[in-house]
Image (tube, rainbow, N blue to C red):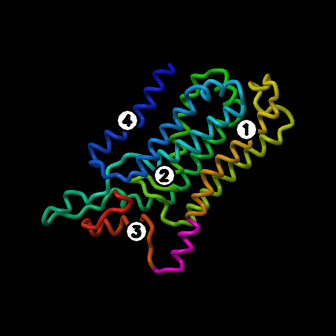
Amino acid sequence: MTLAWALVCVAWVGAYEVAVFLWHRGDWAWYRRLCWWAAGTLLALATLPPVGTRASHVVWVQALQFALLLFGAAPLSAFGAPVVAFRRLPAAAVPGAVRTRPSWARDVKLTPLRGWLGIFAFWVVMVGWRVPPAVDTVARQRAWVWLEVASLLVGGWLLWSALVGSPPWLALHQRPRRMALAAVAMWSTWIFAYVVGLAPRPFYPAFAREPSPMSSQEIAVAVLWATSALAFVPVFFTNLTRWLRSEETPRRLSLWHALERHAAHPSLEGPGGS
């Protein structure tokens, strides 16, 4: 089983290179490729030994596995996903043909809804997989960990694609909205971790037989605090600085407007090397 899952993780990063060769001809930005490889590495680290095996015996290791998936693999895979580069549809080049709006432009009206959907999906997977019944079930029956992995990646991707963008899904247009989503997601994690840390007895009965369950539980709280801060604080302050800079200068350098200019003038070089 371990060997089979290791091969799956290798296929994760190998599929990226195939996608780049077939669709992008190697011109996709190098940092996106690096993020995709890092996401596959964190996925393997969270599910293979020693973390994958110790997660069913030590509560802070289980919290580390959860954090690596939701705050590591999910955002990195959202930012570095191998997707088709933005190009004007072929029908627009035919004389007399009606120009069709690119697919990402048709999604503009859905961006507010994507923000609400993303934070709701994040709440569902974050709270759903940290409540005692879910954690105890995963600890006792390891087959449930694969459902946890899949749901954390999907739920995390729905939020992170709205925060950092995953073409053809653009990040939310308004930077204040991105900052609000990042802050709400981070504070939600902190509040839940705070509730676990204040519990007078072991919060997860399946781990009550540990030599020092309360100390391990406190370490788990620190892990959730630290990893969520490492994930969301850069998003918050990066958008804050760029938003303040755009208020001072008339130039608008967001990815959104760069894509709009590229759609209007296909001869211009696409943003981010895409």
Q: Residue at x 29, y 49 (%)?
A: 24
Q: Which residue is mark 1?
A: 220
Whether residue 86 is situated above or below residue 37 in the rendered picture: below
Rounded to the nearest angstrom, the CA distance separating label 4 from label 3 is: 32 Å
Which quadrant of the figure contains the C terminus? bottom left
The percent coordinates of residue 145 (x first, y second) are 58, 28
- Say what secondary structure mark 1 lies in: helix
The local crowd at label 4, few if under 14, some if 14 to 19, many if 20 or more residues have their Cα within 10 Å, is few
**Magenta extent:** 239-250
What amino acid type should be assigned to the residue bearing mark 4? Gly
Judge from the rendering whether residue 260 lies leftward or rightward of residue 126; answer left or right: left
The residue located at (56%, 63%) in the rendering is 238
Instruction: Left or right? Give the position of 50 relative to 86.
Output: right
Foreground disc of the pair 4, 2: 4
Provide residue 147's location: percent of width, then percent of height: 55, 30
Q: Do the residues bearing badges 4 and 3 touch, measured as CB atoms within 8 Å?
A: no
Q: State the mark number for residue 161.
A: 2
Extreme-right residue of the structure: 200
Tell me the number on the disc at residue 257.
3
Give me the C-alpha separation between circle 2 and circle 3.
17 Å
- Neighbours of disc 3 within 10 Å: few (<14), some (14-19), many (20+): few
Q: Secondary structure at mark 2?
A: helix
**Of residues 269 and 91, the one drawn nearer to the viewer in this rendering:** 269
- Foreground of the two, 56 or 88: 56
* Structural distance between the alpha carbons of marks 4 and 2: 22 Å
